[in-house]
Image (cartoon, grey):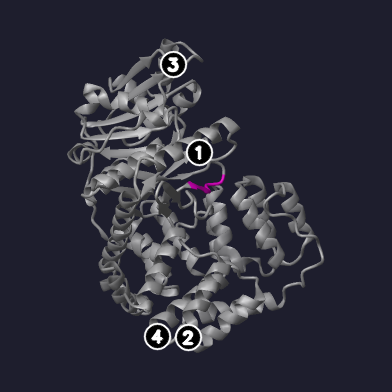
Protein backbone atom coordinates (compact mmCIF):
# COMPACT_ATOMS: atom_id res chain seq x y z
CA UNK A 1 0.00 0.00 0.00
CA UNK A 2 1.36 3.44 -0.91
CA UNK A 3 2.03 6.07 1.71
CA UNK A 4 -0.75 8.24 0.29
CA UNK A 5 -3.30 5.42 0.56
CA UNK A 6 -2.17 4.72 4.12
CA UNK A 7 -2.49 8.38 5.15
CA UNK A 8 -5.89 8.84 3.52
CA UNK A 9 -7.44 5.60 4.76
CA UNK A 10 -6.28 6.20 8.32
CA UNK A 11 -7.61 9.74 8.26
CA UNK A 12 -11.00 8.63 6.95
CA UNK A 13 -11.17 5.91 9.62
CA UNK A 14 -10.15 8.31 12.41
CA UNK A 15 -12.75 10.79 11.25
CA UNK A 16 -15.46 8.14 11.00
CA UNK A 17 -14.58 6.95 14.52
CA UNK A 18 -15.28 10.37 16.04
CA UNK A 19 -17.47 12.00 13.40
CA UNK A 20 -15.30 15.10 13.27
CA UNK A 21 -11.79 15.58 14.61
CA UNK A 22 -11.38 18.02 17.47
CA UNK A 23 -9.96 21.33 16.16
CA UNK A 24 -6.46 20.77 17.57
CA UNK A 25 -6.36 17.22 16.20
CA UNK A 26 -7.66 18.43 12.84
CA UNK A 27 -4.92 21.06 12.61
CA UNK A 28 -2.22 18.53 13.53
CA UNK A 29 -3.48 16.05 10.91
CA UNK A 30 -3.72 18.84 8.34
CA UNK A 31 -0.09 19.73 9.00
CA UNK A 32 0.99 16.13 8.35
CA UNK A 33 -0.93 16.03 5.06
CA UNK A 34 0.16 19.42 3.75
CA UNK A 35 3.83 18.77 4.59
CA UNK A 36 3.86 15.49 2.65
CA UNK A 37 6.09 15.36 -0.42
CA UNK A 38 4.98 15.10 -3.08
CA UNK A 39 1.90 17.11 -2.11
CA UNK A 40 -0.68 15.42 -4.30
CA UNK A 41 -4.06 17.03 -5.06
CA UNK A 42 -5.89 14.58 -2.78
CA UNK A 43 -3.59 15.28 0.19
CA UNK A 44 -3.93 19.02 -0.38
CA UNK A 45 -7.72 18.72 -0.56
CA UNK A 46 -7.91 16.70 2.67
CA UNK A 47 -5.50 19.00 4.50
CA UNK A 48 -7.47 22.10 3.58
CA UNK A 49 -10.73 20.35 4.54
CA UNK A 50 -9.38 19.65 8.02
CA UNK A 51 -8.40 23.29 8.46
CA UNK A 52 -11.94 24.27 7.46
CA UNK A 53 -13.27 21.84 10.09
CA UNK A 54 -11.05 23.40 12.75
CA UNK A 55 -12.28 26.89 11.88
CA UNK A 56 -15.98 25.94 11.82
CA UNK A 57 -15.81 24.13 15.17
CA UNK A 58 -13.60 26.77 16.85
CA UNK A 59 -14.82 29.91 15.11
CA UNK A 60 -13.46 32.49 17.60
CA UNK A 61 -9.80 31.48 17.40
CA UNK A 62 -8.19 34.23 15.33
CA UNK A 63 -5.06 32.19 14.54
CA UNK A 64 -7.14 29.35 13.11
CA UNK A 65 -9.22 31.78 11.09
CA UNK A 66 -6.09 33.40 9.62
CA UNK A 67 -4.68 29.99 8.73
CA UNK A 68 -7.99 28.98 7.15
CA UNK A 69 -8.06 32.16 5.08
CA UNK A 70 -4.47 31.65 3.86
CA UNK A 71 -5.08 28.02 2.93
CA UNK A 72 -8.42 28.76 1.31
CA UNK A 73 -6.79 31.51 -0.74
CA UNK A 74 -4.31 28.96 -2.12
CA UNK A 75 -6.65 25.97 -2.35
CA UNK A 76 -9.91 27.78 -2.90
CA UNK A 77 -13.26 26.45 -1.74
CA UNK A 78 -15.87 29.17 -2.49
CA UNK A 79 -18.42 28.23 0.24
CA UNK A 80 -15.67 28.53 2.84
CA UNK A 81 -14.53 31.85 1.41
CA UNK A 82 -17.97 33.32 2.06
CA UNK A 83 -18.01 31.95 5.60
CA UNK A 84 -14.50 33.27 6.32
CA UNK A 85 -15.39 36.78 5.12
CA UNK A 86 -18.31 36.84 7.57
CA UNK A 87 -16.22 35.30 10.34
CA UNK A 88 -13.52 37.96 10.03
CA UNK A 89 -16.09 40.75 10.04
CA UNK A 90 -17.56 39.46 13.29
CA UNK A 91 -14.39 38.48 15.12
CA UNK A 92 -12.55 41.71 14.23
CA UNK A 93 -15.04 43.49 16.49
CA UNK A 94 -14.69 40.90 19.29
CA UNK A 95 -13.63 42.33 22.65
CA UNK A 96 -10.13 41.45 23.79
CA UNK A 97 -10.36 38.66 26.39
CA UNK A 98 -10.06 40.00 29.92
CA UNK A 99 -7.69 38.65 32.53
CA UNK A 100 -10.26 36.48 34.29
CA UNK A 101 -9.07 33.21 35.78
CA UNK A 102 -10.13 30.37 33.54
CA UNK A 103 -12.12 27.74 35.47
CA UNK A 104 -11.06 24.11 35.39
CA UNK A 105 -13.33 22.87 32.60
CA UNK A 106 -13.14 19.32 33.97
CA UNK A 107 -13.96 20.15 37.60
CA UNK A 108 -15.93 23.43 37.63
CA UNK A 109 -19.61 23.31 38.53
CA UNK A 110 -22.19 24.29 35.92
CA UNK A 111 -23.05 27.44 37.86
CA UNK A 112 -19.37 28.41 38.04
CA UNK A 113 -19.08 28.04 34.27
CA UNK A 114 -22.11 30.27 33.75
CA UNK A 115 -20.68 32.89 36.12
CA UNK A 116 -17.43 32.84 34.13
CA UNK A 117 -19.30 33.28 30.85
CA UNK A 118 -21.23 36.25 32.25
CA UNK A 119 -18.04 37.91 33.49
CA UNK A 120 -16.10 37.34 30.26
CA UNK A 121 -17.16 39.50 27.28
CA UNK A 122 -15.09 37.63 24.69
CA UNK A 123 -16.69 34.66 22.93
CA UNK A 124 -13.26 33.12 22.44
CA UNK A 125 -13.35 32.46 26.19
CA UNK A 126 -17.07 31.83 26.55
CA UNK A 127 -17.22 29.11 23.89
CA UNK A 128 -15.07 26.49 25.72
CA UNK A 129 -17.25 26.95 28.81
CA UNK A 130 -20.39 26.33 26.75
CA UNK A 131 -18.89 23.14 25.31
CA UNK A 132 -17.99 22.02 28.84
CA UNK A 133 -21.61 22.52 29.95
CA UNK A 134 -22.76 20.48 26.97
CA UNK A 135 -20.40 17.63 27.84
CA UNK A 136 -21.62 17.74 31.46
CA UNK A 137 -25.23 17.43 30.29
CA UNK A 138 -26.25 20.42 32.45
CA UNK A 139 -29.46 21.21 30.58
CA UNK A 140 -30.56 24.45 32.26
CA UNK A 141 -27.09 25.97 32.28
CA UNK A 142 -26.43 24.86 28.70
CA UNK A 143 -29.54 26.66 27.48
CA UNK A 144 -28.53 29.74 29.49
CA UNK A 145 -25.08 29.58 27.88
CA UNK A 146 -26.66 29.39 24.44
CA UNK A 147 -28.67 32.53 25.26
CA UNK A 148 -25.55 34.38 26.42
CA UNK A 149 -23.62 33.52 23.27
CA UNK A 150 -26.51 34.13 20.87
CA UNK A 151 -27.12 37.59 22.34
CA UNK A 152 -23.54 38.72 21.64
CA UNK A 153 -22.58 40.43 18.34
CA UNK A 154 -20.42 37.56 17.09
CA UNK A 155 -22.14 34.68 18.91
CA UNK A 156 -24.16 33.43 15.95
CA UNK A 157 -20.94 32.65 14.11
CA UNK A 158 -21.19 29.49 16.23
CA UNK A 159 -24.96 29.36 15.70
CA UNK A 160 -25.08 25.93 14.00
CA UNK A 161 -23.21 24.33 16.91
CA UNK A 162 -25.36 26.21 19.44
CA UNK A 163 -28.42 24.92 17.60
CA UNK A 164 -27.22 21.32 17.97
CA UNK A 165 -26.83 21.97 21.70
CA UNK A 166 -30.36 23.32 21.94
CA UNK A 167 -31.68 20.35 19.97
CA UNK A 168 -29.87 17.93 22.26
CA UNK A 169 -31.43 19.70 25.23
CA UNK A 170 -34.90 19.01 23.83
CA UNK A 171 -35.57 22.46 22.36
CA UNK A 172 -36.08 21.95 18.60
CA UNK A 173 -37.93 25.28 18.19
CA UNK A 174 -34.98 27.17 19.68
CA UNK A 175 -32.67 25.14 17.45
CA UNK A 176 -34.61 26.24 14.35
CA UNK A 177 -34.51 29.89 15.45
CA UNK A 178 -30.75 29.71 15.94
CA UNK A 179 -30.28 28.15 12.51
CA UNK A 180 -32.35 30.86 10.88
CA UNK A 181 -30.28 33.63 12.49
CA UNK A 182 -26.80 32.07 12.39
CA UNK A 183 -23.99 32.35 9.87
CA UNK A 184 -24.68 29.31 7.63
CA UNK A 185 -22.26 26.39 7.89
CA UNK A 186 -22.38 22.67 7.19
CA UNK A 187 -23.25 21.56 10.78
CA UNK A 188 -26.44 23.61 10.46
CA UNK A 189 -27.43 21.86 7.25
CA UNK A 190 -26.91 18.51 8.98
CA UNK A 191 -29.21 19.61 11.81
CA UNK A 192 -31.84 20.72 9.29
CA UNK A 193 -31.64 17.20 7.85
CA UNK A 194 -32.16 15.69 11.31
CA UNK A 195 -35.15 17.97 11.94
CA UNK A 196 -36.59 16.95 8.57
CA UNK A 197 -36.19 13.27 9.45
CA UNK A 198 -37.96 13.91 12.76
CA UNK A 199 -40.92 15.06 10.66
CA UNK A 200 -40.65 12.08 8.32
CA UNK A 201 -39.56 14.26 5.37
CA UNK A 202 -36.92 12.08 3.75
CA UNK A 203 -36.71 14.17 0.57
CA UNK A 204 -35.90 17.35 2.50
CA UNK A 205 -33.33 15.46 4.59
CA UNK A 206 -31.58 14.29 1.42
CA UNK A 207 -31.53 17.85 0.04
CA UNK A 208 -30.02 19.27 3.22
CA UNK A 209 -27.36 16.55 3.42
CA UNK A 210 -26.42 17.03 -0.24
CA UNK A 211 -26.11 20.78 0.36
CA UNK A 212 -23.97 20.03 3.42
CA UNK A 213 -21.54 18.01 1.29
CA UNK A 214 -21.32 20.86 -1.21
CA UNK A 215 -20.42 23.18 1.68
CA UNK A 216 -17.91 20.68 3.11
CA UNK A 217 -17.16 17.55 1.07
CA UNK A 218 -15.07 15.79 3.73
CA UNK A 219 -17.89 14.41 5.86
CA UNK A 220 -17.79 10.60 5.80
CA UNK A 221 -20.74 10.44 8.21
CA UNK A 222 -22.92 12.35 5.75
CA UNK A 223 -21.89 10.02 2.93
CA UNK A 224 -23.19 7.08 4.98
CA UNK A 225 -26.41 8.85 5.92
CA UNK A 226 -27.11 9.78 2.29
CA UNK A 227 -26.47 6.21 1.20
CA UNK A 228 -29.05 4.95 3.69
CA UNK A 229 -31.60 7.52 2.56
CA UNK A 230 -30.98 6.53 -1.07
CA UNK A 231 -32.06 2.95 -0.34
CA UNK A 232 -35.71 2.14 -0.71
CA UNK A 233 -35.21 -0.12 2.30
CA UNK A 234 -36.86 -3.43 3.06
CA UNK A 235 -40.05 -3.49 5.05
CA UNK A 236 -39.70 -5.37 8.30
CA UNK A 237 -42.97 -5.77 10.17
CA UNK A 238 -42.18 -7.75 13.34
CA UNK A 239 -44.29 -10.89 13.42
CA UNK A 240 -45.11 -13.32 16.22
CA UNK A 241 -41.74 -14.96 15.59
CA UNK A 242 -40.06 -11.91 17.17
CA UNK A 243 -39.44 -12.08 20.91
CA UNK A 244 -38.45 -9.19 23.20
CA UNK A 245 -36.65 -10.28 26.37
CA UNK A 246 -35.96 -8.30 29.53
CA UNK A 247 -34.50 -9.35 32.84
CA UNK A 248 -34.69 -7.26 35.98
CA UNK A 249 -33.56 -7.32 39.58
CA UNK A 250 -34.95 -5.01 42.28
CA UNK A 251 -36.01 -2.18 39.96
CA UNK A 252 -39.79 -2.66 39.72
CA UNK A 253 -40.60 1.00 39.10
CA UNK A 254 -37.93 1.46 36.45
CA UNK A 255 -38.95 -1.81 34.80
CA UNK A 256 -42.57 -0.63 34.69
CA UNK A 257 -41.46 2.68 33.16
CA UNK A 258 -39.38 0.92 30.50
CA UNK A 259 -42.13 -1.52 29.53
CA UNK A 260 -44.74 1.25 29.44
CA UNK A 261 -42.55 3.25 27.07
CA UNK A 262 -41.86 0.11 25.05
CA UNK A 263 -45.58 -0.57 24.72
CA UNK A 264 -45.94 2.74 22.88
CA UNK A 265 -43.42 1.76 20.18
CA UNK A 266 -44.11 -0.11 16.94
CA UNK A 267 -43.85 -3.73 18.07
CA UNK A 268 -45.90 -5.32 15.31
CA UNK A 269 -46.92 -8.75 16.56
CA UNK A 270 -43.80 -9.27 18.68
CA UNK A 271 -44.16 -10.95 22.04
CA UNK A 272 -42.37 -10.09 25.28
CA UNK A 273 -40.94 -12.20 28.08
CA UNK A 274 -39.78 -10.62 31.33
CA UNK A 275 -37.50 -12.58 33.63
CA UNK A 276 -37.80 -11.48 37.26
CA UNK A 277 -34.25 -12.18 38.38
CA UNK A 278 -34.92 -12.78 42.07
CA UNK A 279 -36.40 -9.37 42.92
CA UNK A 280 -36.89 -8.85 46.66
CA UNK A 281 -38.22 -5.28 46.49
CA UNK A 282 -41.75 -6.59 45.91
CA UNK A 283 -43.63 -9.84 45.47
CA UNK A 284 -43.91 -11.41 41.99
CA UNK A 285 -47.64 -10.66 41.68
CA UNK A 286 -47.02 -7.02 42.59
CA UNK A 287 -44.24 -6.77 40.01
CA UNK A 288 -46.57 -8.15 37.36
CA UNK A 289 -49.34 -5.76 38.36
CA UNK A 290 -47.08 -2.70 38.09
CA UNK A 291 -45.79 -3.73 34.67
CA UNK A 292 -49.16 -4.73 33.21
CA UNK A 293 -50.75 -1.45 34.34
CA UNK A 294 -48.49 0.55 32.05
CA UNK A 295 -48.36 -1.95 29.18
CA UNK A 296 -52.04 -2.23 28.30
CA UNK A 297 -51.54 -3.12 24.65
CA UNK A 298 -49.18 -6.02 25.32
CA UNK A 299 -51.15 -7.23 28.33
CA UNK A 300 -54.56 -7.11 26.67
CA UNK A 301 -53.36 -9.02 23.59
CA UNK A 302 -51.75 -11.74 25.69
CA UNK A 303 -48.28 -10.99 24.34
CA UNK A 304 -46.68 -10.35 27.73
CA UNK A 305 -45.44 -13.14 29.96
CA UNK A 306 -43.30 -13.44 33.07
CA UNK A 307 -40.73 -15.88 34.41
CA UNK A 308 -39.95 -15.59 38.14
CA UNK A 309 -36.68 -16.87 39.58
CA UNK A 310 -36.22 -17.29 43.34
CA UNK A 311 -32.68 -15.83 43.30
CA UNK A 312 -30.61 -13.45 41.20
CA UNK A 313 -28.57 -15.60 38.80
CA UNK A 314 -26.75 -12.67 37.18
CA UNK A 315 -26.99 -11.14 33.72
CA UNK A 316 -25.31 -13.86 31.60
CA UNK A 317 -27.34 -16.68 33.15
CA UNK A 318 -30.53 -14.61 32.89
CA UNK A 319 -29.97 -14.15 29.16
CA UNK A 320 -29.22 -17.85 28.74
CA UNK A 321 -32.31 -18.78 30.76
CA UNK A 322 -34.45 -16.67 28.45
CA UNK A 323 -32.79 -18.17 25.37
CA UNK A 324 -33.53 -21.67 26.68
CA UNK A 325 -37.29 -21.09 26.87
CA UNK A 326 -39.11 -22.96 24.07
CA UNK A 327 -41.01 -19.89 22.93
CA UNK A 328 -37.74 -17.93 22.65
CA UNK A 329 -35.82 -20.77 20.98
CA UNK A 330 -38.44 -20.83 18.23
CA UNK A 331 -38.15 -17.09 17.54
CA UNK A 332 -36.54 -15.74 14.39
CA UNK A 333 -35.49 -12.46 16.03
CA UNK A 334 -34.74 -11.97 19.72
CA UNK A 335 -34.19 -8.58 21.33
CA UNK A 336 -32.52 -8.17 24.70
CA UNK A 337 -33.28 -4.95 26.55
CA UNK A 338 -32.14 -3.58 29.88
CA UNK A 339 -34.84 -2.54 32.32
CA UNK A 340 -33.77 1.13 32.24
CA UNK A 341 -34.08 2.18 28.59
CA UNK A 342 -36.44 4.42 26.63
CA UNK A 343 -36.77 3.54 22.95
CA UNK A 344 -37.91 5.46 19.85
CA UNK A 345 -41.12 4.30 18.12
CA UNK A 346 -39.35 2.69 15.17
CA UNK A 347 -36.57 0.86 17.04
CA UNK A 348 -37.67 -2.70 16.30
CA UNK A 349 -38.67 -2.20 12.67
CA UNK A 350 -35.43 -0.29 11.99
CA UNK A 351 -33.27 -2.97 13.62
CA UNK A 352 -35.04 -5.75 11.70
CA UNK A 353 -34.58 -3.88 8.42
CA UNK A 354 -30.89 -3.32 9.18
CA UNK A 355 -30.38 -7.06 9.65
CA UNK A 356 -32.11 -7.67 6.31
CA UNK A 357 -29.81 -5.17 4.56
CA UNK A 358 -26.72 -6.73 6.15
CA UNK A 359 -26.92 -10.51 5.69
CA UNK A 360 -23.60 -11.00 7.53
CA UNK A 361 -25.00 -9.28 10.62
CA UNK A 362 -25.83 -11.47 13.62
CA UNK A 363 -26.53 -8.73 16.17
CA UNK A 364 -27.37 -5.05 15.92
CA UNK A 365 -27.26 -2.41 18.64
CA UNK A 366 -28.20 1.23 19.13
CA UNK A 367 -26.73 4.64 19.81
CA UNK A 368 -27.18 5.12 23.56
CA UNK A 369 -27.59 8.63 24.94
CA UNK A 370 -28.00 10.20 28.35
CA UNK A 371 -31.24 11.80 29.45
CA UNK A 372 -31.62 15.54 29.97
CA UNK A 373 -29.15 16.61 27.30
CA UNK A 374 -28.77 13.86 24.72
CA UNK A 375 -25.03 13.42 25.01
CA UNK A 376 -23.56 10.20 23.67
CA UNK A 377 -23.17 7.56 26.35
CA UNK A 378 -22.17 4.65 24.10
CA UNK A 379 -21.85 4.34 20.34
CA UNK A 380 -19.61 1.53 19.08
CA UNK A 381 -16.19 0.15 19.98
CA UNK A 382 -13.29 -1.48 18.17
CA UNK A 383 -9.90 -2.76 19.23
CA UNK A 384 -7.42 -0.06 20.21
CA UNK A 385 -4.61 -2.46 21.11
CA UNK A 386 -4.35 -6.23 21.24
CA UNK A 387 -1.67 -8.69 22.26
CA UNK A 388 -1.23 -11.95 24.05
CA UNK A 389 -3.72 -11.76 26.92
CA UNK A 390 -4.23 -8.08 26.18
CA UNK A 391 -7.39 -6.35 24.94
CA UNK A 392 -7.73 -2.56 24.93
CA UNK A 393 -10.89 -1.13 23.41
CA UNK A 394 -11.60 2.29 21.97
CA UNK A 395 -13.75 4.62 24.12
CA UNK A 396 -17.46 3.87 24.18
CA UNK A 397 -18.14 7.55 23.51
CA UNK A 398 -15.35 8.99 21.31
CA UNK A 399 -17.09 12.38 21.43
CA UNK A 400 -19.86 13.19 23.90
CA UNK A 401 -21.58 15.92 21.89
CA UNK A 402 -24.09 14.61 19.38
CA UNK A 403 -23.78 16.45 16.05
CA UNK A 404 -25.41 13.70 14.02
CA UNK A 405 -22.05 12.09 13.37
CA UNK A 406 -23.14 8.63 14.53
CA UNK A 407 -26.58 8.43 12.93
CA UNK A 408 -25.97 5.70 10.33
CA UNK A 409 -25.45 1.93 10.48
CA UNK A 410 -22.04 0.27 10.19
CA UNK A 411 -20.15 -2.89 11.22
CA UNK A 412 -18.21 -2.64 14.48
CA UNK A 413 -16.56 -4.88 17.04
CA UNK A 414 -19.11 -4.39 19.81
CA UNK A 415 -22.11 -2.30 20.83
CA UNK A 416 -23.80 -1.63 24.15
CA UNK A 417 -25.77 -4.59 25.47
CA UNK A 418 -28.72 -2.57 26.78
CA UNK A 419 -30.50 -2.86 23.41
CA UNK A 420 -29.53 -5.78 21.16
CA UNK A 421 -31.43 -7.57 18.40
CA UNK A 422 -30.18 -11.02 17.37
CA UNK A 423 -30.84 -12.95 14.15
CA UNK A 424 -31.29 -16.37 15.73
CA UNK A 425 -30.86 -18.54 12.64
CA UNK A 426 -27.51 -16.88 11.92
CA UNK A 427 -26.51 -17.19 15.57
CA UNK A 428 -27.23 -20.93 15.56
CA UNK A 429 -25.70 -21.56 12.14
CA UNK A 430 -22.40 -20.03 13.27
CA UNK A 431 -22.60 -21.93 16.58
CA UNK A 432 -21.95 -18.81 18.64
CA UNK A 433 -21.67 -19.82 22.31
CA UNK A 434 -24.17 -18.70 24.93
CA UNK A 435 -23.35 -15.82 27.26
CA UNK A 436 -20.54 -16.92 29.57
CA UNK A 437 -21.71 -17.26 33.19
CA UNK A 438 -18.14 -16.67 34.36
CA UNK A 439 -18.89 -12.97 33.86
CA UNK A 440 -21.66 -12.99 36.48
CA UNK A 441 -23.26 -11.00 37.90
CA UNK A 442 -22.59 -8.50 35.08
CA UNK A 443 -20.04 -6.46 33.10
CA UNK A 444 -18.18 -7.48 29.93
CA UNK A 445 -20.47 -10.46 29.19
CA UNK A 446 -22.10 -8.64 26.27
CA UNK A 447 -18.73 -7.50 24.88
CA UNK A 448 -17.32 -11.01 25.06
CA UNK A 449 -20.40 -12.38 23.29
CA UNK A 450 -19.95 -9.85 20.46
CA UNK A 451 -16.34 -10.99 20.12
CA UNK A 452 -17.57 -14.57 19.88
CA UNK A 453 -19.79 -13.53 16.96
CA UNK A 454 -16.79 -12.15 15.07
CA UNK A 455 -14.69 -15.19 15.99
CA UNK A 456 -17.39 -17.45 14.51
CA UNK A 457 -17.42 -15.51 11.23
CA UNK A 458 -20.41 -13.25 11.80
CA UNK A 459 -20.68 -9.49 12.18
CA UNK A 460 -21.95 -7.10 14.83
CA UNK A 461 -23.69 -3.99 13.57
CA UNK A 462 -24.17 -0.56 15.06
CA UNK A 463 -27.27 1.37 13.97
CA UNK A 464 -27.23 5.02 14.98
CA UNK A 465 -30.68 5.47 13.45
CA UNK A 466 -32.00 4.02 16.71
CA UNK A 467 -31.36 6.39 19.60
CA UNK A 468 -31.92 4.82 23.01
CA UNK A 469 -32.03 6.82 26.23
CA UNK A 470 -30.18 4.74 28.81
CA UNK A 471 -31.39 5.99 32.17
CA UNK A 472 -28.46 4.70 34.20
CA UNK A 473 -24.96 5.39 32.91
CA UNK A 474 -23.10 2.19 33.70
CA UNK A 475 -19.79 3.97 33.24
CA UNK A 476 -20.26 6.56 35.98
CA UNK A 477 -20.56 6.67 39.77
CA UNK A 478 -19.20 3.16 40.22
CA UNK A 479 -18.35 1.75 43.61
CA UNK A 480 -14.99 0.18 44.34
CA UNK A 481 -16.66 -3.23 44.28
CA UNK A 482 -18.25 -2.69 40.86
CA UNK A 483 -14.97 -1.37 39.44
CA UNK A 484 -13.17 -4.42 40.77
CA UNK A 485 -15.83 -6.64 39.18
CA UNK A 486 -15.42 -4.90 35.82
CA UNK A 487 -11.63 -5.15 35.89
CA UNK A 488 -11.76 -8.80 36.95
CA UNK A 489 -14.18 -9.68 34.15
CA UNK A 490 -12.07 -7.83 31.60
CA UNK A 491 -9.07 -9.87 32.79
CA UNK A 492 -11.09 -13.05 32.30
CA UNK A 493 -12.02 -11.97 28.77
CA UNK A 494 -8.38 -11.30 27.91
CA UNK A 495 -7.56 -14.89 28.84
CA UNK A 496 -10.34 -16.39 26.68
CA UNK A 497 -8.79 -15.41 23.33
CA UNK A 498 -5.25 -15.86 22.09
CA UNK A 499 -3.48 -13.19 20.08
CA UNK A 500 -4.03 -14.91 16.72
CA UNK A 501 -7.80 -15.02 17.32
CA UNK A 502 -7.87 -11.35 18.28
CA UNK A 503 -5.80 -10.44 15.22
CA UNK A 504 -8.22 -12.29 12.92
CA UNK A 505 -11.17 -10.50 14.51
CA UNK A 506 -9.42 -7.15 14.15
CA UNK A 507 -8.71 -7.73 10.46
CA UNK A 508 -12.30 -8.86 9.88
CA UNK A 509 -13.77 -5.78 11.57
CA UNK A 510 -11.47 -3.38 9.70
CA UNK A 511 -12.19 -4.98 6.34
CA UNK A 512 -15.95 -5.11 6.92
CA UNK A 513 -15.99 -1.46 7.96
CA UNK A 514 -13.87 -0.29 5.02
CA UNK A 515 -16.01 -2.27 2.59
CA UNK A 516 -19.17 -0.84 4.13
CA UNK A 517 -17.97 2.73 3.63
CA UNK A 518 -16.88 2.07 0.05
CA UNK A 519 -20.30 0.64 -0.74
CA UNK A 520 -21.93 3.72 0.77
CA UNK A 521 -19.64 5.98 -1.24
CA UNK A 522 -20.37 4.10 -4.47
CA UNK A 523 -24.10 4.41 -3.78
CA UNK A 524 -24.00 8.22 -3.59
CA UNK A 525 -21.15 9.16 -5.96
CA UNK A 526 -23.35 9.13 -9.08
CA UNK A 527 -25.58 11.85 -7.63
CA UNK A 528 -22.91 14.01 -5.96
CA UNK A 529 -22.38 17.40 -7.56
CA UNK A 530 -19.13 19.33 -7.64
CA UNK A 531 -17.18 19.96 -5.50
CA UNK A 532 -18.22 16.97 -3.38
CA UNK A 533 -18.20 14.56 -6.30
CA UNK A 534 -14.79 15.75 -7.47
CA UNK A 535 -13.37 15.43 -3.95
CA UNK A 536 -14.60 11.89 -3.30
CA UNK A 537 -13.63 10.65 -6.78
CA UNK A 538 -10.06 11.62 -5.86
CA UNK A 539 -10.26 9.86 -2.50
CA UNK A 540 -11.97 6.63 -3.61
CA UNK A 541 -9.01 4.95 -5.42
CA UNK A 542 -6.86 5.31 -2.29
CA UNK A 543 -9.59 3.80 -0.10
CA UNK A 544 -9.91 0.93 -2.56
CA UNK A 545 -6.16 0.39 -2.38
CA UNK A 546 -6.33 0.28 1.43
CA UNK A 547 -9.12 -2.30 1.27
CA UNK A 548 -6.72 -4.73 -0.39
CA UNK A 549 -4.14 -4.38 2.39
Q: Earlier in the sequence, mark 3 or mark 1?
A: 3
The nearer-to-camera label among 2 and 4 is: 4
Q: Earlier in the sequence, mark 1 or mark 2?
A: 2
Q: Which residue is labeled 4 in the image?
A: 40
- Distance between mark 2 and mark 4 Cα atoms: 15 Å
Q: Which residue is labeled 2 in the image?
A: 76
In the visual, does 497 lie left or right of 146? Answer: left
Q: Is residue 281 above or below residue 385?
A: above
Q: Which residue is labeled 1 in the image?
A: 487
Q: Earlier in the sequence, mark 3 or mark 2?
A: 2
**Tags 3 and 2 in contact by the CB under 8 Å rule?**
no
Q: Is residue 132 above or below residue 84?
A: above
**Tags 3 and 1 in contact by the CB under 8 Å rule?**
no
Q: Is residue 217 above or below residue 281?
A: below
Can you name the residue that lies furthest to the right here?
Answer: 99
Q: Position of residue 200 (x, y in %)?
A: 36, 51
Find the magenta span and give its range.
373-377
Amino acid sequence: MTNAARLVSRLVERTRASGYLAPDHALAAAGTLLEARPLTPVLAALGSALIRHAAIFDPFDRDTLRLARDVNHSLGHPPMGEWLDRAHQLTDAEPVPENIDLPDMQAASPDALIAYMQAQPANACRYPALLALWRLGARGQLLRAVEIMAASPSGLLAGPVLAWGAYGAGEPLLARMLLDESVPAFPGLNLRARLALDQGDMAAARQHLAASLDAEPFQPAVIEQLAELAESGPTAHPGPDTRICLYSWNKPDMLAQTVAALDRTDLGEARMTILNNGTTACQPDELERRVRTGAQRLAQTGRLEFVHLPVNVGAPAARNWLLSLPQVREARLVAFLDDDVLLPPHWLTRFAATLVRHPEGVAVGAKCVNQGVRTIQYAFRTFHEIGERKIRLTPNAPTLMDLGQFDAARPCLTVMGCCHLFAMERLRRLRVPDFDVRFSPSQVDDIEHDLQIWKAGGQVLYDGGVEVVHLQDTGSARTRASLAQAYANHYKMEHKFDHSELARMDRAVIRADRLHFLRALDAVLPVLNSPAGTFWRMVRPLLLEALGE
